[in-house]
Image (cartoon, rainbow, N blue to C red):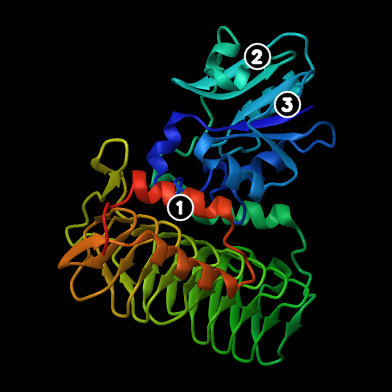
């Protein structure tokens, strides 16, 4: 049974994070949305099909070499699921699973959004037409959770991390090195992966939720980690760092205080400073003593820039920090206001607060922004990625250049 995970028009609300990746590749806890869907519909029969925007097809294929991208198998039934669906056990998931293999098409929708559809024989051009039209009379998917806005990525983050860590398994297994001087509170709720290390004086407290240290992850001297927390492979919590209710992806470094945040992968916040209720994409770097505000002085609702509205919209939340697109960086002592959205490939510096919305490929800060030259930006990316043994491919270059031309500031810095 091929599983087709698709994007729809609503992914545009998730820019700038979806400028460089398909929405289903966004981390929503310990795993991505796609990881959750694959777990929910795990099957050994049939290929994985990923449907994404044409501009992202090449980098999506690069990210998922095992999948078919924007191509359906020639025959047989297909299960279509929305890549923004945060799949959870329950009646809806059971109903979708039960429909697989039936002779009749079925579909489930949340308002105007298709959540899932089973079709025993979809037309060859199904991915070229609105998928909602595949099945007449979609059933209500009232309990479905679709990630629609940037702040939805952080909703119930602790619960998501706890769920994912428990699904990953291995709690109570300490396969790496734990120094005798480290403190493990509720060690039965801790996983220390192969090659991981917990240094002297580190405190790992799983009283409020499980903690997962991936292979070769490190918690350095005097650091405090309070679960639920996920540290991906080779992730590092720097000495005296404090991490709580957060997910830190592959080969990322965090220090200072990190609270209810997601650091996607290959990004660094290695020094003192506060990161709260925030989301960093890949290849980001926060300079020493960078601080994010996640609460307004009047305790009011935080507004956040929405790319579709072209304006700030209400988030419905008191606590929203920073959303930063891939390859963006800021200098030492940078201050981000509540609900700031920074695009792809921004280089921010100087005193004062940068604007609460910084377009992609911007260079500057509170005193003004000018365009970041594309070739210069790509040279920096190539050098940064080489430090993690990751090449900047021709497909990466083509996508990033298109973002600069279509979504970023024009001209030269």
User: Is residue 266 at least partly visible in the picture?
Assistant: yes
Q: Quadrant for residue 91, please give it.
A: top right
Q: Position of residue 373 (x, y in %)?
A: 33, 62
The image position of residue 386, as x and y in percent, is 59, 72
In-front residue for pair 327/41: 327
Q: Quadrant of residue 311?
A: top left
Describe the element under mark 2 as helix, strand or loop: strand
Q: Give me the C-alpha separation between circle 1 and circle 2.
A: 39 Å
- The residue singled out by tag 3 in the image is 97
Q: Does residue 166 sit above or below 380 in this rendering? A: above
Quarter of the image with the N terminus is top right
Q: Residue at x 65, y 14 (%)?
A: 106
| Residue under the point 55% across and 67% down | 266
Which residue bears the numbered disc 1?
400
Closer-to-camera residue (215/211): 215
Q: Is residue 182 left or right of residue 308?
A: right
Front one among 409 and 338: 409
Residue 320 to residue 274: above or below = above
Image quadrant holding the C terminus, namely: bottom left
Badge 2 local density, few (<14 within 10 Å), some, or many (20+)? Answer: many
Task: Say which element carries label 1.
Answer: helix
């Amino acid at each position: 049974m091929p599983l087709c995970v698709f994007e729809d028009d609503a992914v545009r609300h998730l820019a700038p994070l979806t400028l460089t990746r398909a929405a289903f590749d966004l981390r929503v806890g310990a795993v991505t949305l796609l990881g959750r869907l694959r777990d929910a519909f795990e099957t050994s029969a049939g290929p994985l099909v990923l449907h994404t925007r044409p501009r992202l097809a090449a980098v999506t294929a690069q990210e998922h070499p095992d999948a078919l991208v924007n191509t359906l198998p020639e025959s047989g039934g297909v299960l279509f699921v929305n890549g923004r669906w945060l799949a959870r056990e329950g009646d809806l998931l059971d109903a979708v699973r039960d429909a697989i293999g039936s002779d009749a098409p079925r579909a489930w929708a949340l308002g105007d959004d298709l959540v899932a559809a089973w079709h025993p024989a979809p037309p060859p051009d199904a991915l070229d037409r609105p998928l909602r039209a595949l099945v007449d009379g979609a059933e209500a998917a009232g309990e479905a959770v679709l990630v629609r806005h940037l702040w939805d990525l952080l909703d119930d983050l602790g619960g998501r991390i706890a769920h994912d860590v428990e699904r990953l398994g291995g709690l109570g297994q300490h396969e790496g090195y734990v120094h005798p001087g480290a403190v493990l509170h509720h060690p039965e709720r801790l996983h220390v992966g192969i090659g991981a290390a917990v240094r002297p004086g580190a405190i790992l407290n799983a009283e409020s939720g499980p903690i997962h240290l991936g292979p070769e992850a490190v918690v350095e001297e005097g650091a405090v980690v309070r679960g639920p927390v996920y540290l991906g492979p080779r992730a590092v919590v720097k000495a005296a760092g404090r991490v709580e209710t957060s997910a830190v992806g592959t080969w990322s470094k965090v220090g200072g205080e990190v609270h209810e945040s997601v650091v996607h992968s290959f990004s660094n916040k290695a020094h003192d400073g506060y990161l709260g209720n925030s989301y960093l994409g890949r290849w980001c770097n926060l300079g020493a003593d960078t601080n994010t505000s996640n609460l307004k002085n009047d305790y009011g609702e935080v507004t956040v820039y929405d790319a579709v509205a072209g304006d700030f919209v209400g988030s419905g939340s008191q606590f929203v920090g920073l959303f930063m697109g891939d390859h963006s960086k800021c200098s030492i002592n940078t201050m981000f206001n509540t609900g700031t959205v920074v695009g792809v490939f921004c280089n921010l510096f100087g005193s004062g607060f940068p604007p609460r919305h910084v377009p992609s490929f911007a260079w500057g800060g509170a005193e003004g922004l000018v365009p970041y030259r594309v070739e210069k930006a790509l040279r920096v990316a190539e050098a940064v990625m080489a430090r993690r043994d990751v090449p900047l491919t021709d497909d990466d270059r083509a996508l990033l250049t298109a973002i600069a031309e279509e979504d970023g500031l024009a001209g030269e810095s």
